[in-house]
Amino acid sequence: MADPNLLSYSTLQELQGCPRKFELNKLLAHKQIEVDDEPVDFAFGHAVAAGVQDYLLNGDRAKALLACFMNWKAPYLDEKEKKKKSIYYAAFAVEKFIYEKEMLLKDWELLTFNGVPAIELSFLIELPAQKKYRGDIDAVLCHKTTKKIMVLEIKTTGFSNVDEAIYKNSAQAVGYGVVLDQIAPNSTSYDVLYLVYQCGSMAWITMPFVKTRVQKALWIKDVLSDVQVLQMYEKQAHFPKRGQHCFSFFKRCAHYDYCGSSNEALGLGVGKQAEVREQELRRFALPHYQFKFTLSQILSTQMSLTQTHN
C-alpha cells in the first residue's frame, strides 16, 4: 500500500468490512516483500483484462495474447483446473473475446481524450483531511452513431450463475461517472457495461446498467461519510475488528493470528506509525495520474450539470 491517506474502491471496502484489517494493511505495507507472484485467481483476472484492453486498443490478436501472457503474475504452471483458471485458460478467454467482439460491442468503439486512448485511465480526487481517492477506469467507449459515452468494466467470475445484483449497485462504476463528467461532455445519465467472463462455462456475457446524476451525488456523499468515519477511528486510535470477516474467499485473513494484539505489541506504536507514514509519503511522493481533481471542482461540475439539465 502506498500513501496512508490514499483511498480507493477496494480500500474503502476493507474499511467498511473490517476497520482493523484496513489499519493493519496500511501499517504493515512497508514490511511486505514485493514479489511478482500472485494467486491464480488474481493473475487470471489481470491477464484477461490486459488482453481485452490491448485488443480494444490495437485490434491485433498477437499483441493482445502477448499482453495477456505478460500480465500473468503467477508461475506459468500454476492453475486451478476445477475453476478453469490458468495462463492457457486466460489466453482462451482473450481469444474468445476477439472472436465475439463484434457481437459483444457491435456499435461501440474506444474513446480518445485529447488524442489519448481511454484505456486504464488513472485519476486522483483530493478529499478533506488530506485524504485522496484514486482509481483506474478499464476503458471508455463511445457509440459510433449517437456518440453516447459508456464505461466498460472487465470482470471474470467463477460463479456459474451471474446475478446482476453482483454489479448493478456497485459504487465503483458510479465514481467513474463522476470523473468522466470532469474530463468529457456527458448527459444526465450514462451507461456502464460489465463485460463478464464466466470461467466455468468459458463464455462472455454483457450486463448494461444506467447510472444517473442522483447516483453520482450519493456517491460523493458516501465517500465523504467514509472519510468522516476514518477520521473518527484515527482520532480514537481504535479501528474495530469485525470477526465475521476473519474468514472470506475460502481462507483466513492474513492478519488473523495477531490482529488482536495492540499496535505497540506489534511494534507499530505511534512513533513507528509516524515513521512508516513518512517512509511511504517519500516513496510515493510523485505518483503519476492522468487526471487530478479537487473535491471543490467535482462539486462545482455536478452542480453546474444539474442546473443545465433541469
Image (cartoon, grey):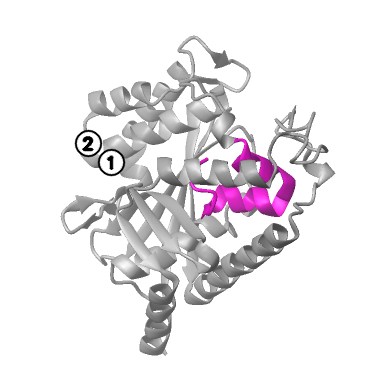
Residue at 65 percent of width and 48 percent of height: 14
Q: Is residue 202 left or right of residue 20?
A: left
In the image, farthest residue toward the front: 271
Residue 308, position as x, y percentages in the image: 36, 87
Name the element at disc 2.
Answer: loop
Residue at 70 percent across and 33 percent down: it is 249
- Numbered circle sitting on residue 8: none
On whether residue 11 falls in the magenta region, the answer is yes
Residue picked out by circle 1: 56
Q: Residue at x 54, y 49 (%)?
A: 4
Viewer-closest of 219 and 288:
288
- Category of crowding for the residue at label 1, using alpha-carbon neighbours closer than 10 angstroms: few (below 14), some (14–19), many (at least 20): many
Helix, strand or loop at mark 1: helix
Q: Label for residue 59? A: 2
Residue 146: quarter of image? bottom left
Looking at the image, residue 70 lies above or below residue 123:
above
Q: Is residue 85 left or right of residue 292?
A: right
Residue, x 35% and y 43% (percent of image)?
103
Q: Which residues are magenta?
A: 1-28
Considering the whole magenta stretch, tell me its main secondary structure.
helix
CB within 8 Å, label 2 to label 1: yes
Quadrant where the C terminus sits is bottom left
Count of picture labels? 2
**Camera-side residue of 175 and 92:** 175
- Taking the view exactly as shown, the residue that stands out farthest to the top is 77
Q: Amino acid at mark 2?
A: Gly
- Which sits in the foreground, 167 or 233? 233
Whether residue 191 appears in this view of the structure is: no
